[in-house]
Image (spheres, grey):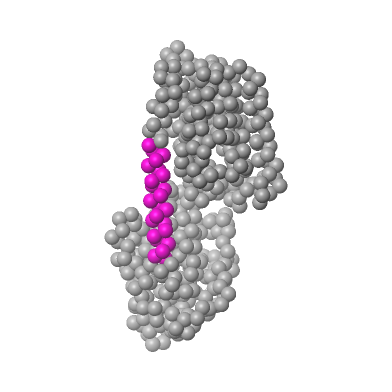
């Protein structure tokens, strides 16, 4: 338990101890070993199957395929047989390994959850044993309540350990890690009853027949996760290529991507749409690759022609990414993240709700990260000062609704200014004194500074 806090060690130890006590108590009861033994083997096999995380990033929570088997054990063998079968998880081989602490906690909480579920099932009048036409209807309600008890106990025990072992806030923990469990629980639970119904006819093959589609779906999900990870890696490589040209934006795309995805979650977007928004944030400045380096790193004011070249970077970005099929929904965020609500932005001068949602989100995320990051000509602003500036720019420049969402995200998750110790040297000298994402920078224009709104961001 090295590295765990005192409360976490005590809690994990307590869960393991309660589970072990329940197992010892279970062995004092008569159980049908002809059913418990094959169910235990099925639990081991199911727990060894790859578990696909239900939500990335928030505690790595996933739901084992063994859940339906445990619920079938509740019906077929009662609470004590189910506890013994669940204890077999201790011997499951998990690809990638599982630390002893995690193994003890998981097995302990499985035994607690399934034992309580079994007691509820019998307590509501359901009899232990295979289901058939005579007792199926009377078992439906007890099974549903028992499955609910299992889910609630499981989620409660996991919630506590995540709260004790990670910096995740409780609200984020629920939204990002635990809420996605609900539909999977709803889908997996009835499979346990199907196994119990088929068991009397085909025995252990009941699990194979009932779980086959789940394993196929799980395999497909694994392939999807692998594909997404490959996409993420490729897109991060693109983003780093931009940062190699414009050194003061190092890490900027990653931070805008993270902040944008948090805003998407706050807006209630589904996981797939949040993933696309994350890609849009990561690639919003990809078009800078086609902007001459000497312009990006110019040490003085931009000329009108240089300013026009900078303004093309969203267009370049869209053109570079438009042939990537899975990025179709990302392109509007790349192309329009420098539009303004009053129509004075670029490249197309869109206004208000004509500006795509992704672009309105990225615009405020972009501005916050820019102002709270060190630049060659200034130190990072505080989050309080940056948010005050963004609020002042709400309406003419930023969507007020997105500013409100940004405020909610910053309040809930926090945001740290990004400091750079020193300006990196370049062949051009000091890096540019303009920042296209900072709403406090004046517009450059002709040979001297272009007059105009003092809050209009430099297009870089």
How far across and down, in percent of the image, does residue 99 sit? 59, 44
Magenta stretch prevailing secondary structure:
helix
Q: Residue at x 34, y 67 (%)?
A: 317
The residue under the point 34% across, 60% down is: 331
Is 236 above or below relative to 375? above
Residue 358: quadrant of the picture: bottom left
Q: Nearer the viewer, residue 255 or 97?
A: 97
Residue 125 in percent (x, y) is at 56, 16
Q: Please report the bounds of the magenta region as a residue range.
A: 216-239
Asked whether 226 falls inside the magenta stretch, the response is yes
Task: Tell me which corner region of the image, top left, top right, bottom left or bottom right, holds residue 326.
Answer: bottom left
Q: Let me know if residue 323 is in the magenta part.
A: no
Measuring from the top left, give residue 195's x and y in whole percent.
Answer: 44, 24
Residue at image location 55% in from the left, 34% down from the top: 91
Please state which of residues 3 and 179 is positioned toward the viewer in this rendering. 3
Image vertical order of residue 97 relative to residue 249, above or below = above
Q: Is residue 177 visible?
A: no
Q: Is residue 100 visible?
A: yes
**Does residue 68 appear to the left or right of 223 in the view shown?**
right
Q: Nearer the viewer, residue 172 or 27?
A: 27
Which residue is at 46% across, 17% downward?
Answer: 131
Q: Measured from the top left, where is residue 232 in percent x and y?
A: 41, 57
Instruction: Give left or right: position of 445 versus 101.
Output: left
């Amino acid at each position: 338990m090295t590295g765990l806090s005192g409360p976490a060690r005590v809690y994990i130890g307590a869960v393991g101890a309660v589970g072990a006590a329940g197992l010892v108590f279970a062995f004092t009861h008569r159980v049908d070993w002809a059913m418990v033994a094959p169910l235990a083997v099925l639990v081991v096999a199911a727990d060894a199957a790859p578990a696909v995380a239900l939500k990335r990033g928030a505690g790595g929570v996933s739901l084992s395929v063994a859940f339906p088997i445990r619920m079938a054990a509740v019906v077929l063998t009662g609470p004590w047989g189910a506890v013994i079968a669940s204890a077999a998880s201790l011997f499951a081989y998990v690809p990638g390994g599982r630390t002893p602490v995690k193994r003890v906690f998981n097995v302990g909480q499985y035994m607690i959850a399934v034992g309580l579920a079994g007691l509820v099932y019998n307590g509501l009048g359901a009899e232990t044993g295979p289901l058939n036409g005579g007792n199926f209807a009377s078992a439906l309600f007890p099974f549903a309540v028992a499955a609910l008890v299992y889910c609630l106990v499981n989620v409660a025990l996991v919630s506590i350990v995540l709260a004790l072992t990670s910096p995740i806030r409780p609200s984020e923990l629920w939204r990002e890690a635990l809420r996605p469990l609900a539909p999977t629980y709803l889908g997996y639970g009835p499979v346990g009853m199907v196994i119990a119904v088929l068991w009397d006819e085909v025995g252990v093959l009941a699990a194979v027949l009932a779980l086959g589609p789940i394993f196929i779906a799980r395999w497909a999900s694994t392939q999807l996760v692998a594909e997404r990870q490959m996409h993420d890696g490729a897109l991060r490589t693109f983003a780093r290529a931009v940062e190699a040209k414009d050194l003061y934006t190092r890490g900027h795309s990653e931070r805008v991507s993270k902040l944008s995805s948090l805003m998407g979650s706050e807006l209630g977007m589904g996981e797939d749409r949040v993933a696309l928004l994350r890609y849009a944030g990561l690639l919003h400045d990809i078009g800078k690759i086609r902007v001459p380096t000497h312009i990006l790193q110019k040490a003085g004011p931009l000329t009108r022609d240089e300013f026009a070249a900078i303004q093309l970077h969203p267009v370049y970005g869209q053109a570079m990414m438009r042939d990537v099929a899975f990025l179709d929904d990302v392109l509007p965020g790349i192309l329009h993240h420098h539009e303004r609500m009053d129509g004075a932005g670029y490249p197309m001068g869109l206004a208000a709700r004509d500006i795509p949602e992704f672009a309105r989100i990225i615009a405020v995320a972009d501005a916050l990260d820019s102002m709270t990051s060190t630049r060659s000509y200034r130190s990072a602003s505080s989050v309080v000062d940056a948010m005050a500036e963004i609020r002042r720019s709400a309406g003419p420049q930023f969507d007020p609704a997105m500013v409100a969402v940004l405020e909610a995200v910053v309040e809930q998750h926090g945001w740290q200014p990004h400091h750079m110790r020193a300006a990196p040297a370049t062949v051009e000298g000091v890096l540019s004194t303009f920042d296209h994402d900072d709403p406090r920078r004046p517009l450059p224009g002709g040979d001297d500074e272009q007059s105009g709104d003092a809050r209009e961001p430099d297009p870089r």
